[in-house]
Structures are given as structure tokens and as C-alpha cells.
Image (cartoon, rainbow, N blue to C red):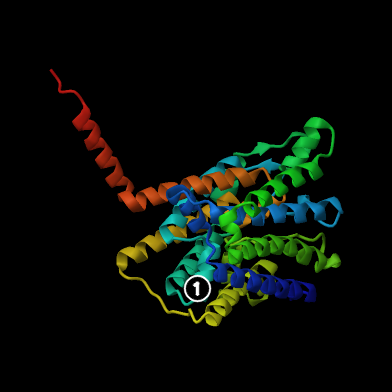
Amino acid sequence: MQSVSAWLSALAGFAIGVVAGFAVQRARLCTFGAIEDALIGGDARRLKVFGLALGIAILGTQALVLTGFLSPELTTFVPPALPLVAIVIGSLMFGIGMAMVGTCGFGSLVRFGTGDLKSLVVILVLGATAYATLRGLFADLRISVLEQLSIQMPDGIRSDFASLLAEATGSDLRLPLAVLLGGSLCWLALTDKRLRRAPRLLTAGVTLGLLIVAGWIATVGLADDFAGPPRPQSLTFVSTVGKALYAGVLNVANFADFGVGTVFGVIAGAWLAAWHAAELRWEAFDDDHEMRRHLLGACLMGVGGILAGGCTIGQGITAGSLLALSWPIALAGIVVGARIGIAILVDGSPRDIIQRNWMLLARKAPPSK
């Protein structure tokens, strides 16, 4: 039986998820859309909005660390050994999967809240494959093989930039690092004249950043001191989707979890935003080709998100708020994977791309004498 504090944490997660889902749906904010705009369209405005969210999350989270409220070593994002191989493979898989689906795990929850039944299929498959990688069929391979290929941090310190800088210089540079990085990201977004003319986007970015901080506060403040050390959490949408699916199918007590609460909260918040704007629409797959593409993408995101340690929100903002070493590596892998996925969608399957390039090389090759 779960404690009262666990259910209160789940309720806090639900409330935070509602606000996140409402703000993101209202602003039409999407991580894959932001990456696609920047890579293909040359428009970095939505990417800067996520940068704004990250900047606010860094400033708020590091303030919690500096005051002693939050202990980064109790989170899952800054382990003493960095599973580099798993992060690289997982982030590439997640990025490709995100391109196949057209959004990430968080975006799928938002879309489902607006009536997109395609996203329901994605959520179910993503959740099942994520849980299989976390604790089921693929867990042994992940733990005994991929996560063993790790880089051990010196002297047992944690894998975050502030700790490494302190080890290298002998000084605690957490505050100037947080102010420099967080302030720069906020400045890049707030000085963009075109972005300032999009108040909904800016509001969504500010809200998302503050909600990351609120997640840390809720999970630490509502922790049961008698149940052992608290496990601080904030927004991430891969493992939590798997846990939500497991709770609904096998163990109702697992609903008493902050992350599970955020999953249902995001759906509810997106539904409220769509209902308020009269934008609720039922939508299904157009054909079997589209369904196959979404199923493949959901599998890649489920497995890849667990290997990478999070999604575009979990690694891109939540881990980033802790200045985790995994954050830029995972984020770069997701972007590269997304670009590969876009190329596959535009140019055809990998086999078609290889065949076309081979034929092109054959035509250019000089004739044999």
C-alpha cells in the first residue's frame, strides 16, 4: 500500500502535467517541430523557446542545489559513471523514432489529449517497449552490456559539469556556471524581436522552465522521510509512460507516482486547451503505411529513450537543469537522429538511399579498360 505522501506527489505531478499540457498545446509548441524548423526551415524561434525553458530551469534548479534543498546525487541524471555508449545509441534511436512519429513522447501525450488516436497507439507501444527496456525483456541487455560500457568519474564524483569543474579547479563554480549558461539561454530568446511578438510561445517556454523547478520542489518537499532518502524527479516522458501503462494493466498502486501523475496531467491539460479553443478533433491513421511508420517510431522512442536516460524533455531540459554530462550528448544524438529520420522520410528507406547512391557512384566511375 502506497503512503499518503506518494499519492500527494502523484497529485502534484498531475497538476504540473495539466499546466504543461495546456501551455504547450495552446502555443503549438513541439520539440520535433522546433528541430525541424531549425534544420530544414532555418527558423530557430521555437528552438529558442526550449532554450528559454532550459535557461529558467537551470537558474531555478541550481538555486535549489545551492540552498541545499535539492541533492543532485539523489537523482538518476548524474550517476558516478556515464553510460556513454547507451546514451549515444539511445539518443540516435529516439531522434529517428521521433521523426517517424512526427513528435516526441511528450508531444504524443499532448496530441492524444486533442483527440489524435494515432498518438494513443504510439503511447501504448512506446510505454510497452520502454518498460520492457527498463525492467522487462531487454533490461538484462541494457544493464549487463550497454551500461557496463561507461566512463567512471574521477574520485567517485557525480557526472555533472559543476562537480567536474570543482574537481579540476578546486573551487565551486556552480553559481557562475549556472548564471552564465542559464542567463545566456534566456537572453538569446528574449532578445529575438520576432519571438517577442509571439507571447504564447514565450509564455509556454517560461512555464515549462518553471514547471521543471516545481517538479523538483514537489518530489523533495512531499517525500516521506520514513521511507528512506527522497528520489527527486521532474518532467520526463519515456519511463513514466511505461510506468503508467504498467500501473493501469498490472498494479494500480503504481499510480501513486509523480511521473505517472504527469503523464495523465499532460493529456488532461492538452484536452482542456483544445476544448477551450474548440479544436478537439478525432483523427486516425490514413493508411497502413502511416500506421507502420508510427509503430516503428514508437518502438525506437521507447527503447531509445530508456537507453538515453530520457527524452527531449527529460534529457533536453530536466537533465540540463542539473548540468548533467549526459545532457549535451543526448541532445546532440537526438538532433542527429531526427535529421537522419527526416532524410529517410524525404528520400525513402535506408535501402533505397543506399541503392540510389550506389547507382550514382557506378555511373560516375570511369569505364574499365
Seen at 57% across and 65% down, the residue is 242
Question: Going by the image, does 320 lie left or right of 36?
Answer: right
State the image coordinates of residue 138 (x, y, percent, origin top left).
52, 54
Q: Amino acid at mark 1?
A: Phe
Q: Name the image quarter holding residue 20.
A: bottom right
Question: Going by the image, does 65 lie left or right of 139?
Answer: right
Residue 241 lies, with reference to residue 178, above or below; the image says below
Q: State the residue lying farthest toward the top.
A: 369
Seen at 72% across and 37% down, the residue is 153
* Quadrant in the picture for the N terminus: bottom right
Residue 269 lies, with reference to residue 322, above or below; the image says below
Q: Nearer the viewer, residue 293 or 323?
A: 323
Q: Residues within 10 Å of mark 1 (few under 14, many from 20)?
A: many
Question: Going by the image, does 92 lie left or right of 4?
Answer: left
* Quadrant in the picture for the C terminus: top left
State the image coordinates of residue 125 (x, y, percent, origin top left).
47, 65
- Does residue 263 appear in this view? no
State the image coordinates of residue 51 (x, y, percent, origin top left).
62, 52
Seen at 77% across and 51% down, the residue is 72
Q: Name the image quarter holding residue 359.
A: top left
Seen at 80% across and 36% down, the residue is 166
Identify the secondary structure beneath mark 1. helix
| Number of marks | 1
Q: Name the image quarter holding residue 265.
A: bottom right
Q: Nearer the viewer, residue 305 or 20?
A: 20
Question: Going by the image, does 167 lie left or right of 267?
Answer: right
Residue 243 lies, with reference to residue 142, above or below; the image says below
- Does residue 99 appear in this view? yes
Q: State the residue lying farthest toward the left.
A: 369
- Please name the residue that numbered disc 1 is placed on: 112
